[in-house]
Amino acid sequence: MQRAANTALHGCAQAGGPAHVGLTSSRAYGVIPPPRDPEEKEMLHRILRVDHAGEYGANRIYAGQMAVLGRTRTGPLIQEMWDQEKKHLEKFNEILAENRVRPTALLPLWNIAGFVLGASTAVLGKEGAMACTVAVEESISEHYNSQIRALMEKDPERYIELLNIIKEFRDDEMDHHDTGLEHDAETLPGYWLLKNAIQLGCKAAIYVSQRI
Amino acid sequence: MASLLRVLRTGRAFRGLGNALTRQSGSLRRGFYGSALRLENESKSDKPPSSSSTMYHEHYQAHPNEKGDSIRSNMSYQDQSGEHGEEYETEEQLQARIFTAALEFVQQYGWSMEAIAAGAETLGLSSASTGMFSNGAGDLVLHFIAQCNSNLTDILTEQHKHVQLGQAETKKTSDFLRDAVECRLRMYIPYIETWPQAMSILLLPHNIPHSLKHLSTLVDDIWYYAGDRSTDMNWYTKRAALTGIYNTTELVMVQDSSPDFQDTWNFLDNRIQDVVNMATTIKQLKNIAGMNQRQ
């Protein structure tokens, strides 16, 4: 059994190399279509990279919140939202691996920053955690919406699978946003300030994760 | 990093770009090194990224009626039905043919314009056709590297196929890496005398972005076929480690005078073993510190 592999290897001693093989992907239909050219590939990879970073960050934010509020009344609520984010992250991990997309190099930064954000807002109490959730989920929904718009402008049929996934995740994030509002996010003193500060941070994170 | 460089390149090359891609043959702007891939992989269908050479050079003449499209290098002058289109040959294809012919003369003339001139002459062209190469020696080396990378990718996909068909067993990661790096470095053996010159050419500032790009796609390919599907920092650490291993082994190889480069392969074994040991140690330390969480 090793011999087949070995003969292929020994063939590589000549500069000519063995006859090439057409490579077909093992799945006929993946989430994203095989890119037609480098521009499209770059665009799709950016989208996936930033979305992956976003879900990863959201995950860490909820982890931070749970670390502080896990044993209070809001614990189960936060846990539920966290579980949904975990599913999102899993899906993106799968897509990235399948399409050989490079993850953003800033993941360790988002790891720490997300946890710190979640924990510090949770220290302000349940309203603080909910305010953070509202701010972040609003940013993410806006971001997903603009991606959906961009993909629809280009070619809705070609990207139908990816669009469906983003739409589904956007709907989940909107749910979280609404949940946050329902649970007294706005009663936090300094709500407006905190919300805008967090959203500014999210915008910066999105900008940077697309490129690095 | 490859993506960063690629982004810089595409940004530069496509400022103020127009529209659609024409899949027809004719005036299509393509990368230099892409043509090497095309020669090797003419009947390859759209395969996922690994092409080591989608470069868009502004060196050569812009064809008047096209607006600098970026076509994947896999799309050759053959049209959609796969048959050979017109007899038209683009400039990069011609250059690729000249480079391939020039490789025969590298031993004699080194990686230089003389080799390219000699190669052009074997194709029946005048040696003055070297005038179309503004970065001849560098492009020759880069062409050769792109060719080696695509050969390696072919070999790895072939092996992968055998494994999937059950005709071969999956190798351990360290063995896979060792075999892949050894295979790739063996492609240099016919040119090993002149390889130090080639390496120094690659270090020239205008060649560095391209050589780094080839290196990063090489390393990415090897890890992909080794089964790496990580989407966290491991993506970076693994590739950095393999880049280190590959570069140091290459350096050892050019100074190696043992029979069949046995010293080099031993060195390679030891370096891979080092990385494996380091990974194991880190994992153990993490276990002790309680840091090893569920993924």
Image: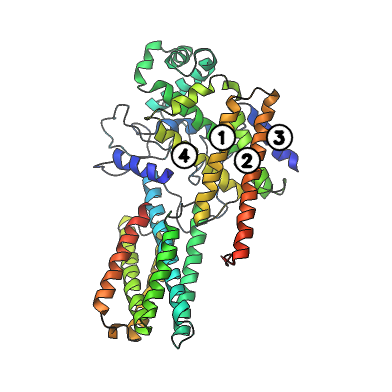
Labels 2 and 3 share a subunit: no
Residue type marked 4: Ser
Task: Indicate the amino acid at tag 2.
Answer: Arg
The kind of secondary structure element at disc 2 is: helix
In this rendering, the answer to whether B7 lies above or below A81 is: above
Task: Kindly identify which residue carries mark 4.
Answer: B81
Report the residue marked by disc 3: A7
Q: Mark 1 points at which residue?
A: B248
Q: Residue at 40% of width from left, 11% of height from top? A: B127
Residue type for callout 1: Thr
Chain designation of label 2: B
Q: Write the residue at 28% across / 30% down.
A: B62
Task: Look at label 3 and name its amino acid.
Answer: Thr
Q: In which quarter of the image is residue A139?
A: bottom left
Q: Earlier in the sequence, mark 1 or mark 2?
A: 1
Q: Evaluate if marks 1 and 2 touch, with contact meaning CB atoms under 8 Å apart.
A: yes
* Pick the front one: A128 or B86: A128
Left or right, B250 with reference to A159 = right
Identify the subunit bearing mark 3. A
Query: SS at mark 1?
Result: helix
Viewer-nearest of labels 4 and 1?
1
Badge 3 marks a residue whose secondary structure is helix
**On the picture, is B220 further left or further right than B66?**
right
**Gap in angstroms between the C-alphas marked 1 and 3:** 26 Å
Residue B41 screen position, x and y as percent: 52, 35
Give above or below for B129 relative to B77: above
